[in-house]
Image (cartoon, rainbow, N blue to C red):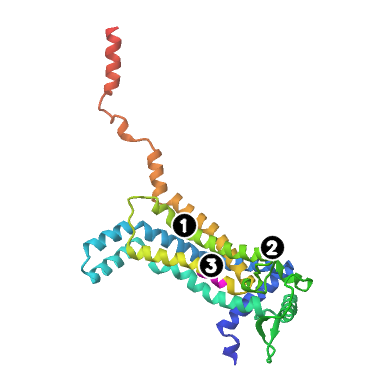
Amino acid sequence: MILAAFAPWEWLLSLLGTLLAFYYDVLPEYGISIILLTLTVSLLLFPLTVKQTRSMKAMQEIQPEVKRLQKEHKGDKEELNKQLMELYKEKGVNPAAGCLPLLVQMPIWFALYRVLWQGYGIPQDSSLKGVLDAANQALYVTGPDGNLTGTLKEGVNLASAAFEHVRFLGMNLLVRPSQAVDLGDIVGSLPYILLIGAIVVAGFYQQVQTTRRRKDDPNTEQAPQMQGMQNAMKIMPVVFGFISWNFVAGLGLYFATSNIFRVGQQAIILRMGDDDGPKGKAAEIERAPDPSDDPPPGSGPSPHASKKRNRRRKK
């Protein structure tokens, strides 16, 4: 019983629910509370984001060497894998680091779904718990066991005053966009559509940030596995858009905030890499005066100076 009480899953639900309730007590706006919780999680995961961004950039930087090894060991996969491992070790590159933040966040996403819809993990004596319970009871049909079925009550008005505490930017955060979007009500549906669009666009832009600079270099060839990884990552924004369409809008707000915040994080990380990396050093060298332009000490006057003296003598 003691182990069950302190199981990691229950602990995660309690942590997220307690933080969300705390932010709601500080600023009683449900949408703002979700945004603050998102920023907290993003800041805690910042070291992993740095590792992921730098690893993806480093993987692209070494693609010419990877391509060369593939040509040299085309018929020997065992030797090729050995050489690639040595190259990754030498350059300090971890190919799996790009997926690490996604793997770490998966339990958080599942836990957030339970917290943001059903209120699991939120302290029973908190004001947020009372708000969510009342709104859910007004929104959803309950089953014989008293649990929510996920089916909206017939004729419920998502914009009514009963849901003012769970509305944000024109959205009822306790319903799914697939439930709220109505082609007969474009104005009421627009916030949900824009939310899905923000998730997908920000997700795509994250991929552009880490691939744009290497694609601009015509001399850089990408290995097939690197291209395959990039293609797989491009699918993820669409996957998150689909998930957000079928889960409560509160979780979609988390995804949108996380993606937009991460765009800013990656911009800072990449900028820091440019300032400290080979490109930054190359720029400093390019700006420095070239010693070869000046004659070495003791080598006598330059040819230009001798010509000027000869002109003066003729005059």
Is residue 254 shown above or below 218?
below
> Which of the two discs, 2 and 3, labels the residue nearer the N terminus?
3
Q: Amino acid at mark 1?
A: Val
**Magenta segment range?**
239-243
Residue 200 as seen in the image, left or right of residue 303: right
SS majority, magenta: helix
Asked if the residue under mark 3 is in contact with the one under mark 2, i.e. CB atoms within 8 Å, the reply is: no
Q: Residue at x 77, y 71 (%)?
A: 160
Label number found at residue 45: 3
Q: Find disc 1 in the rendering and name its residue.
A: 208
Is residue 254 shown above or below 300?
below
Q: CA distance from mark 1 to mark 2?
A: 31 Å
Q: Mark 3 Cα within 10 Å, few/some/many (few <14, many 20+)? A: some
Q: Residue at x 52, y 75 (%)?
A: 106
Is residue 275 shown above or below 307?
below
Q: Residue furthest front?
A: 184
List x then y, in percent, for residue 84: 29, 66
Q: Residue at x 34, y 61 (%)?
A: 91
Q: Mark 1 Cα within 10 Å, few/some/many (few <14, many 20+)? A: some
Q: Amino acid at mark 3?
A: Leu
Q: Quadrant of the C terminus?
A: top left
Q: Amino acid at mark 2?
A: Val
List x then y, in percent, for residue 289: 37, 35
> Which of the two discs, 1 and 2, labels the residue nearer the N terminus?
2
Q: Find disc 2 in the rendering and name its residue.
A: 187
